[in-house]
Amino acid sequence: MGDEILIKKQEIRKRLWSEMERKGIATFPLPCFGRIPNFKGAELTALKLQSISEYKNASSIMVGPDSPQAPVRRLALLDGKLLVMPSPGLESGYLIIRPSRVKGKEKEASTIRGAFKYGESTNAPPPLDLILEGSVAVDLNGYRLGKGKGFGDREISLAEDIAKKSITVVTTIHDIQIVDFVPREEHDKKVDIIVTPTRIIRISSKA
């Protein structure tokens, strides 16, 4: 059963990657296969995220290192929020970027190279108010698919263990990445809010 779920998950990923490239939705870096796909409208999606209360009230936010979340990382720094970025593959732990240190350099600091340049390395994130993960696909029950390595689930679990509470999880995606159903395993983490270029979708329950 476990192998069957993994196969179905990969089928969804391949379909989304192919469709996003075929329709010209995916953008640099290309090809998007094997990635959290960057998409046209990522900047607009980040601006839409700014409007939700959970973002406005957050002092510290963890944002995944993938390309479509770069606009969110930049806006978080511009908005004076403590930014935590997991290093790619968690190979170097987490990077803490303080907005006071990158005044005028927010765009550079929001890149992976800039985060390593200006950030402080740590093995675990500090207490967080909000988590933002990239996704390949998400369904309307809040189940998400990442690249298939399990990093997003690990990041969320560790952050909630440290905080000793549930933390609101958001994903920013293109509308095409919303699917009817994502196969799930016991360890899979859900998102609370889906933000696209056109919509803000609140998941009714994480149960």
Image (cartoon, rainbow, N blue to C red):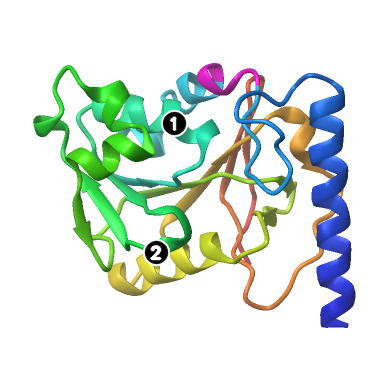
Instruction: Establish if 181 lies above or below 162.
Output: above
Is residue 52 visible in this depiction of the protein?
A: no
* 174 relative to 91 in the view: left or right: right
Q: Which residues are magenta?
A: 40-44
Say which of 164 and 64 sits in front: 64
Residue 36 is covered by the magenta coloring:
no
Residue at 73 percent across and 53 percent down: it is 141
Quadrant of res 145: bottom right
Few, some or many residues within 10 Å of mark 1 (<14, 14–19, 20+): many
Q: Which residue does the image show at 28% across and 40% down from the upper left? A: 115
Secondary structure beneath label 1 = helix
* 156 left or right of 17 in image: left
Question: Crowding near pointer 2: few (<14 within 10 Å), some, many (20+)?
Answer: few
Q: Relative to 111, does residue 183 appear above or below in the rendering?
A: below
Where residue 163 sits, quadrant-wise, is bottom left
Mark 1 lies on residue: 70
Magenta stretch: dominant SS?
helix
Question: What residue is drawn where x is 64% and y is 48%?
Answer: 203
Judge by depth and name the residue closer to the eye, 68 or 156: 68
Q: Is residue 111 left or right of residue 135?
A: left
Quadrant occupied by the N terminus: bottom right
Mark 2 against mark 1, which lies toward the viewer? 2
- Which residue corresponds to the image point at 80% horizontal and 30% vertical from the top-left? 20
Give coordinates of residue 13: x percent, y percent. 79, 50
Extreme-bottom residue of the structure? 1
Q: Amino acid at mark 2?
A: Glu
Which badge, 2 or 1, comes first in the chain's sequence?
Answer: 1
**Amino acid bearing label 1:** Ala
Vertically, is 197 above or below 154? above
Kindly report the distance in space between the C-alpha atoms of the residues bearing marks 2 and 1. 19 Å
- Could you tell me residue 91's position as x and y percent? 39, 64
* Residue indicated by mark 2: 91
